[in-house]
């Protein structure tokens, strides 16, 4: 009995550790965004999170995936389009439409409860990060790279997970590296402009580089060329998340009541 409990505990610990590694990129985006917020916006965001950390808010949408009652959120994480085309607004729910709808709802929150606002905050913390991973704006034919087999250090993986997390870990990409990405004053100002569909198009523009594989084996050159893109995209996502949070929780008088 004790032996079985030990095996169960070790298995659970390993699975949780592996799952936690997948959270790195989202944590970086949340932390960058929070550093860009003014005191009032930061206070309001924390108030509406009701004790949840920004890191947990950033991964909540992934954390609840195993619960069937949240299956309705599965299409929220991505928008696919045929190769050679740009993503467009459609009647179907996808990452672009959900972010845009969430921003509009938070700008006019009269019908939202505090719990509703917390959920929408979690949407923003997570989905703005997802949108800046190029394969979340991928091709329909391979499900955003999920069906493309690659080999990293001899181990079979898939292209989507390679960009979601594996190269972040392999190249030891962290918060400090992402914060060091240089921007001109003009570029920084541009990052505060909210245009979700344009962000999706920018992210998708990296796909030719993502698929620049002569072989399924991921070599050092591929990772060396991918790492600056990953760091830049995480940095941009943080800036843009901050811009949304300032708009919804800083300038919006209706959402300034929570922390007062």
Image (cartoon, grey):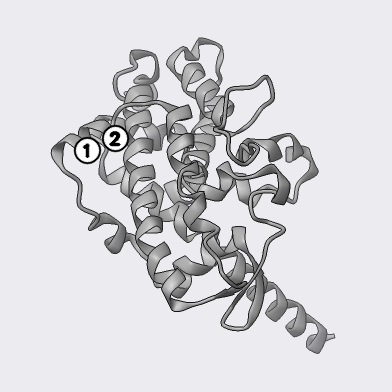
Q: Which numbered circle lies on residue 188?
A: 1
Give the spatial CA distance, label 1 vs label 2.
Answer: 5 Å
Q: Quadrant of the C terminus?
A: top left
> Which residue is pictured at 56% across the width and 82% down the height?
153
Q: Is residue 51 visible?
A: no
Task: Judge by depth and name the residue closer to the eye, 85 or 12.
Answer: 85
Q: Quadrant of residue 36?
A: top left
Tag 1 secondary structure: helix
Residue 233 image point, x, y percent: 39, 49
Q: Which of 221 and 84 is in front in this view?
A: 84
Furthest residue in direction bottom, as rendered: 3
Q: Residue furthest left?
A: 185
Instruction: Give the residue drawn at x 27%, y 37%.
Output: 37
Which quarter of the figure has residue 184? top left
Tag 2 residue:
191
Residue 27 position, x and y percent, is 43, 54
Query: On screen, 194 above or below 240?
Result: above
In the drawing, what numbered circle is on residue 49?
Answer: none
Q: Is residue 59 above or below residue 195?
A: below
* Residue 82 percent location from the top left of the image: 65, 38
Position of 134 relative to 174 (above/below) = above
Is 232 left or right of 57, judged from the image as shown?
A: left
Can residue 178 be seen by looking at this rendering? yes
User: Mark 2 Cα within 10 Å, few/some/many (few <14, many 20+)?
Assistant: many
Q: In this view, does 49 lie to the left or right of 143?
A: left
Of residues 37 and 228, which is closer to you in this image? 228
Q: How dense is the environment of label 1, judged by Cα within 10 Å: few (below 14), some, or many (20 and up)?
A: some
Q: Is residue 138 left or right of residue 100?
A: right
**Position of 51 relative to 177 (above/below):** above
Q: Are the two marked residues, 1 and 2, in contact with CB atoms closer than 8 angstroms?
A: yes
């Amino acid at each position: 009995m004790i032996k079985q409990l030990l095996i169960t505990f070790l298995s659970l610990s390993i699975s949780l550790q592996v799952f936690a590694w997948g959270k790195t990129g989202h944590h970086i985006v949340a932390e960058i965004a929070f550093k860009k917020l003014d005191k009032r916006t930061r206070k309001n965001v924390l108030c509406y999170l009701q004790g949840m950390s920004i890191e947990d808010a950033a991964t909540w949408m992934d954390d609840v995936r195993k619960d069937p009652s949240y299956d309705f959120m599965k299409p929220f994480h991505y928008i696919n389009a045929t190769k050679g085309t740009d993503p467009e607004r459609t009647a179907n729910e996808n990452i672009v439409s959900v972010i845009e709808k969430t921003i509009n709802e938070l700008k006019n929150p009269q019908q939202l409860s505090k719990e509703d606002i917390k959920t929408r905050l979690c949407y923003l913390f997570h989905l703005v990060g997802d949108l800046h991973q190029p394969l979340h704006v991928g091709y329909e034919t391979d499900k955003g790279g999920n069906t493309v087999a690659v080999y990293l250090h001899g181990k079979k993986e898939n292209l989507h997970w390679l960009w979601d997390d594996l190269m972040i870990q392999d190249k030891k990409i962290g918060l400090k590296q992402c914060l060091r990405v240089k921007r001109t004053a003009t570029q920084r100002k541009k990052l505060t402009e909210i245009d979700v569909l344009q962000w999706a198009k920018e992210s998708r523009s990296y796909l030719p580089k993502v698929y620049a594989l002569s072989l399924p084996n991921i070599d050092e050159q591929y990772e060396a060329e991918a790492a600056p893109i990953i760091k830049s995209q995480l940095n941009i996502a943080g800036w843009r998340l901050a811009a949304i949070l300032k708009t919804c929780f800083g300038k919006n008088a209706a959402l300034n009541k929570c922390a007062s």
